[in-house]
Amino acid sequence: MARMTQKHYEKRLILAMLVYMAVLVADGPLLHATANLPLKALLAVAPVLPMLYVIALMWWRIRDSDELEQRTQLVALGVATALVSAISMVGGFLVTGGVLHLGGSVLIWVFPVMMAGYGIAYRQVARHYGMGALCTGEGSSWVPWYFALTGVLMAALGINAWRHRNLWDAWVFAATAAFFVILAIVSRVRLLRARRMAGKD
Amino acid sequence: MNNRVRELRGEREWSQADLAERLEVSRQTVNAIETGKYDPSLPLAFKIAKLFGLAIESIFEPGE
């Protein structure tokens, strides 16, 4: 069975995430304009579809990996699961104790936080074994551009929230935009450095 | 565990990518084995031994 390269995986992941963001942006106005409950429910869960593809993509990636890659990915997933479980439990107790006031919409963050935790844990575990795509120049050159685009989108959403005087959302989007722009710069520099080093070998 | 994978690969003038392709693993996995950061499973160790035409114990030996 042909192995899915890091580059192909990242390209497919980025495409799925772009579809996710497009659906997310289009979904809000459509939800407000719809009164029909079944249609509203369908629109509400529409962003889940690209996320299901991302989960399937991860499954294919792990299935086609060799033994060391599988070990690295499963350890990273374990760490991410433990992290999200711990954060959820702390949050749950804080809400129960009346310290925090969170609505059900906070559950939207479970998957992104888990993926972020997975990404960070994967880099750490991969570094332990002296591997990691960004260190070898084998990652996709799309990644920095995807981070930059996400940063721009977050900034646009932040400006929109600020215009509607929703300062909390504006602050969250601005912080997220800054995070993605920094991520874009760091990943671009690392990719160029890795390729320069690979060229020297 | 110590191993002679890098030495045996060098004798055949294979790159890490060449060996990775023959073993159907990633180049990073070959690198991790060669540098002693990862000890391969028994099936992969047998595959390596078969590829080099040697017994497992002549390639891998317990570390101190």
Image (spheres, rainbow, N blue to C red):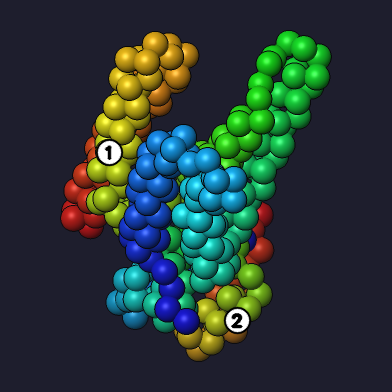
Q: Is residue A142 left or right of residue A176?
A: left
Compare residues A65 and A49 and report the one nearer the observer.
Answer: A49
Location of residue A180 (image quadrant): top left
- The residue lying at 69 percent from left, 14 percent from top is A100
Residue type of the residue flagged with mark 1: Leu
Residue annotated with mark 1: A149
Residue type of the residue flagged with mark 2: Phe
Q: Is residue A37 left or right of residue A197?
A: right
Are dots 1 and 2 on a single chain? Answer: no
Q: Nearer the viewer, mark 1 or mark 2?
A: 1
- The residue lying at 62 percent from left, 55 percent from top is A74
Q: Specify whether residue A175 is in view.
A: no
Q: Tell me where residue A120 appears, x and y as whole percent.
A: 51, 39
Q: Report in which chain the residue with disc 1 lies.
A: A
The C terminus of chain A: image quadrant: bottom left
- The residue lying at 63 percent from left, 78 percent from top is B43
- In this rendering, the answer to whether B15 lies above or below B28 is below
Q: Is residue A192 left or right of residue A15?
A: left
